[in-house]
Amino acid sequence: MAFRRAAKRTILLGGGAVAAIYGVSQLSTYKKQTQHMFVDAAEPLKLLHLDELPSRESQLCALQNTKEFDVLVVGGGATGSGCALDAVTRNLKTALVERDDFSSGTSSRSTKLIHGGVRYLQKAIMKLDYEQYMMVKEALHERSNLLDIAPHLSAPLPIMLPVYKWWQLPYYWAGIKMYDLVAGGQCLKSSYVLSKAKALELFPMLKKDKLVGAIVYYDGQHNDARMNLAIALTAARYGAATANYTEVVRLLKKTDPETGTERVCGARCKDVITGKEFDVRAKCVINATGPFTDSVRKMDDEKISNICQPSAGVHIVIPGYYSPDNMGLLDPSTSDGRVIFFLPWEKMTIAGTTDTPTDVTPHPMPREEDVNFILNEIRNYLSPDVEVRRGDVLAAWSGIRPLVTDPNSKDTQSICRNHIVNISESGLVTIAGGKWTTYRAMAEETLDSAMKAHKMKSSKCNTVGLMLEGGKDWTPTLYIRLVQDYGLEMEVAQHLASTYGDKAFDVAKLAKVTGKRWPVVGKRLVSEFPYIESEVQYAIKEYACTAIDIIARRTRLGFLNVQAAEEALPRIVEIMGKELKWSEQKKKEELEAAKQFLYYEMGSKTRSEQLTNTEINLTPADVDRYKNRFHKFDKQKKGFITVVDVKHVLESISVQIDENTLHDILNEVDLNKNGQVEFNEFLQLMSAVQKGRVSGSRFAMLMKTAEENLDEREAVSVDRSGGGV
């Protein structure tokens, strides 16, 4: 036993020595580079900074009435917004257009990590791949910068890597230590090794069998859609003409008098809200459209070959009790070799991602097989005490990762692991590939290349260390002032502070008095989430145009719980309708569009299919039990239950539920949507509940609770009462 321990220690020290030699060899150069970057960024920007965000209408006017911009960026995701911010802070006249909402695509559907890429570093070392190593190195620098410039939206997150074989412990430890060393002075916190007992103490949901220990390392986590929006809003405050729901219909071209070739000189745009078309002229057009890269490139040259290789990544959200509050988990060896993350996020647990080829679509949908793959992988490393149920999936979404091939590469079939900047013969600048963490570096490289190709002069990049919207005056204790000054609930105040940063006070000022002793202001949209009604009003100032913008990106309700989001929708539409002067018809259209979004893109469809596609598999005793329960509501033995039946039973046990809520509860079970729940539908529900395919069913719980109350109220028999004596 003593020899075994000594051997293990030797292996650990040996692995550490190798990691140290390799890491330190790179550390000196890296520190010099990063120090130089931060010294440059320390110079104060002498730029216009608007205290008030211009309205969308004024931004559209600027797009239409400006004779010529220096730069027109197409695409309002992280990269496109980053390009616009980079350009405008170089004192370039900048425009940014997005055909949907900011972050409506891949940038809002990520794993929510700000990371260097542990697995990329592993490949770099194993294959002696310098390109991959430099990619990790760049990402770690960008990770540090992003955590600095948006402290309210991001934070370090410890991630546990469970180890189930002794030989893996020194192997993983050496790799993770290398990750720390490559980060150098920008290492968030040092990684460390845990014993089996300590690992289970910190992550009690872990499977105990064969667990040897664990390694914990640190990466960053953020609210991706809000981060993307913060970048776009910051660009707008520095003077960029920024408009969502503005689609590029075609590219504009003119003939260069010197060469006689056609050059891209702008774009024909359409306001999606009104349908009005107009031209936006620009010296340089940047294509930053992610998965839609090729569609814009073909506007320039329809014969050009595709470079985008779209890949679908599915994530699921399950209740927060599946993971500790502040500890993520990485499974580096799933059944098919992919990496699965299991992370706490917004008091829920997010798990993913898959990686499967897909077609480019503006409305990607999560597939049931991908959801089940993630659930099966979760079962592999969670304790048998934790029953992983399909019914616990509260939301699921698919994001399209825009992997690309380099058109300048000799081997055009090879996937580019990083990103590419391509400039066409007509001058269209395309930035494609990459990942969320490196959006700023990608934008810098894109603008540098664009300025050189178009022979334009500008100041150097100023975005390293440049604070994003809400970050400048944010402090970790800002939420306390919100509680004390406005009388907000602490949970609501914490949410506002971590979402809007120093702009949280503007949201609090819009909050209406509740009329209660506490909280004084701030009515919630739904009881279990800290989102309040005044956020809807403020979202319109942040260019929200639809109800989907609210539930998906200004708040994250749709990504966290589709049922809660649907419950909040009527009030959201009502507030937006009043602010934007919508007609009754427009309100109905918005409500229906948002429900369709939840149904198809946020996993509501796959969730409801768990009930529809479930075969009734109950024992005769179960059927009799549920039949008795059903007949306590269906007293006339009609074979179905209506809202009226449920209401009568609830009144008899002195329980009151709003009639609209009752309709919603029954609608969850009413598979054929005929306004009533048949006995067969009820049995299907109970069978699905037993199998774990449906959980948290309000109808099932209501029926059970009502039955128990009715049984308690039944008269006591003479035998049981002892003859009345």
Image (cartoon, rainbow, N blue to C red):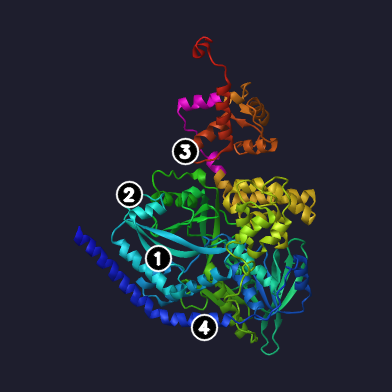
Q: Which amino acid is tagged 1?
A: Ser
Q: Which residue is mark 1?
A: 191
Q: Is residue 57 magenta?
A: no
Give how far apart the Cα atoms at labels 3 and 1 are. 40 Å
Does 441 appear above or below 477? below
Does 632 appear above or below 220? above
- Crowd tier of the residue under label 2, counting other residues whose Cα lies within 10 Å: few below 14, some 14–19, many 20 or above: few
Give how far apart the Cα atoms at labels 1 and 2 are. 24 Å
What kind of secondary structure does the magenta stretch mostly adopt?
A: helix
Q: Residue furthest front?
A: 484
Q: Which residue is mark 2?
A: 209
Q: Which residue is mark 4?
A: 36
Question: Residue 519, percent across and down?
Answer: 67, 49
Give how far apart the Cα atoms at labels 3 and 2 are. 25 Å
Give how far apart the Cα atoms at labels 4 and 2 are. 49 Å
Q: Are marks 3 and 1 in contact (CB under 8 Å)?
A: no
Q: Which residues are magenta?
A: 608-629
Give whichever of discs 4 and 1 has the lower sequence position: 4
Give how far apart the Cα atoms at labels 4 and 1 are. 27 Å
Residue at 49%, 45% in the rendered image: 390
Give whichever of discs 1 and 2 has the lower sequence position: 1
Q: Which residue is mark 3?
A: 691
Give whichever of discs 3 and 1 has the lower sequence position: 1
Closer to viewer: mark 3 or mark 1: 1
Give whichever of discs 3 and 2 has the lower sequence position: 2
Residue at 44%, 67% in the rendered image: 189
Closer to viewer: mark 1 or mark 2: 1
Label 3 element class: helix
Closer to viewer: mark 3 or mark 4: 4
Q: Quadrant of residue 5?
A: bottom left
Q: The N terminus appears in which quarter of the rendering? A: bottom left
